[in-house]
Amino acid sequence: MTDMLALDFMQRALLAAVLVGATAPLVGVFLLQRRLALIGDGMGHVALAGVAVGLFFGQSPVWTALVCAIVAAVVIELIRTSGTTHGDVALALIFYGGIAASVVIIAKSPRGTPASLTAYLFGAITTVAPADLWTFAALSVVIVAAVAVLRTRLFAVASDEEYARSAGLPVLGLNLALAVLTAVTVVVSMRIVGLLLISALMIVPNAAAQRLGRSFSSAMAWAVAIGLLSATGGVVISYAADTPSGGTIVLLAIAVFIVVALGSAVAARVRRARRRGHPEAEGHGHEHGPGCGHEAVAHGDHVDYLHDGHRHAPHGAHYDEHPRAADPSHGSQR
């Protein structure tokens, strides 16, 4: 481990992995809510065309990829919003057009070969240059700041677009902002995870986090934690095992998801067994307790609270749903 950290390229790779692991889930949580889990793949294909353009003209592939990805993101969202073409058709056009353009352009490039695109497709920890790291850091700051400012609005639009529109929110502008953030995230991630795999790092940590968090904020925090673990752990493993960094990161994220899914299933069984037949009350934002405003009813050795015609009994981190009529047998179960 010490020998690895002594290498300059590994230091840059780990720093880039931290940036990727923290930012990708922040954007992916909104894509998952909108059922646009594969939008990152479409952005990746167009970003690859931007990489080819940069190699052709001898410019930085990062900036040409960023421009192409942002333009594609805006076009996809405008087509989807117009209703003239289904979103999946527009996404397919971006998929095929981007990858085809990259192949044709790189074939005519005097400075690159098809092999030049491999590091961008699948990720390569040795390709992160110091200048790229500074660029990725600046773009990551933009992503984090934008999500911090727009989080509640993006959540409202992703949850119920029609309600957000009726509430006066600029739905089109927020959708465009999310599309641009997705494009920026793809470019930030392309050297570490690869353009073909970045969508997985946006979605898989959030899929696992939904099983751990009890609120949107906590689920987002869990997603970032899992993203950081997957990205940095994947880079370390890829160095030790001499495997592609992108594939290793994604496989680690999937492994974490499987562990979380199995663990949450076991925990749910244990909770059901402990409740001994009491269903869990539907979640709500109110905290029951003395002086909460809801009528308290003695129930065996504990207290139930009347809430919208239901009797809720505090039980750890949740509320049990008790029958409306008192049952003396319940007292022995608490």
Image: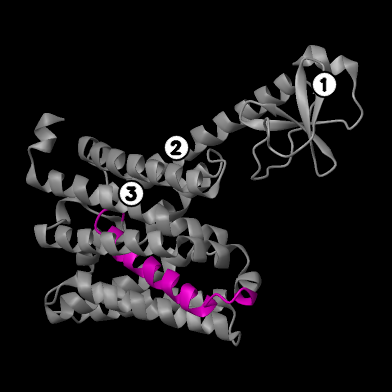
Q: Which amino acid does label 2 sit on?
A: Ala
Quarter holding the C terminus? top right
Instruction: Give the percent coordinates (x, y) of residue 59.
Output: 13, 77
Residue at x-position 62% and y-position 73% = 167
Numbered badge on residue 255? 2
- What secondary structure prevails in the magenta region? helix
What residue did someone put label 3 on? 21
Q: Which of 78 and 37 is in front in this view?
A: 78
Q: Give the range drawn in magenta.
A: 165-193
**Side of 300 where 77 appears, left or right:** left
Q: Do the residues labelled 1 and 2 touch (CB within 8 Å)?
A: no
Instruction: Give the percent coordinates (x, y) of residue 84.
Output: 60, 88
Q: Which of 154 and 26 is in front in this view?
A: 154
Q: Which of marks 2 and 3 is nearer the N terminus?
A: 3
Pointer 3: residues within 10 angstroms few (<14), some, or many (20+)? Answer: many
Q: Residue 183 magenta-drawn?
A: yes
Decide if residue 190 is in sight here.
Answer: no
Q: Distance between the residues labelled 3 and 1?
A: 48 Å
Pointer 1: residues within 10 angstroms few (<14), some, or many (20+)? Answer: some
Pointer 2: residues within 10 angstroms few (<14), some, or many (20+)? Answer: some
- Quadrant location of residue 121? bottom left
Q: Do the residues labelled 2 and 3 touch (CB within 8 Å)?
A: no
- Judge depth for marks 1 and 2 and give the one in front: 1
- Quadrant location of residue 297? top right
Q: Which of 217 and 199 is in front in this view?
A: 217
Decide if residue 49 is in sight here.
Answer: yes
Number of marks in the rendered image:
3
Q: What residue type is labelled 3?
A: Gly
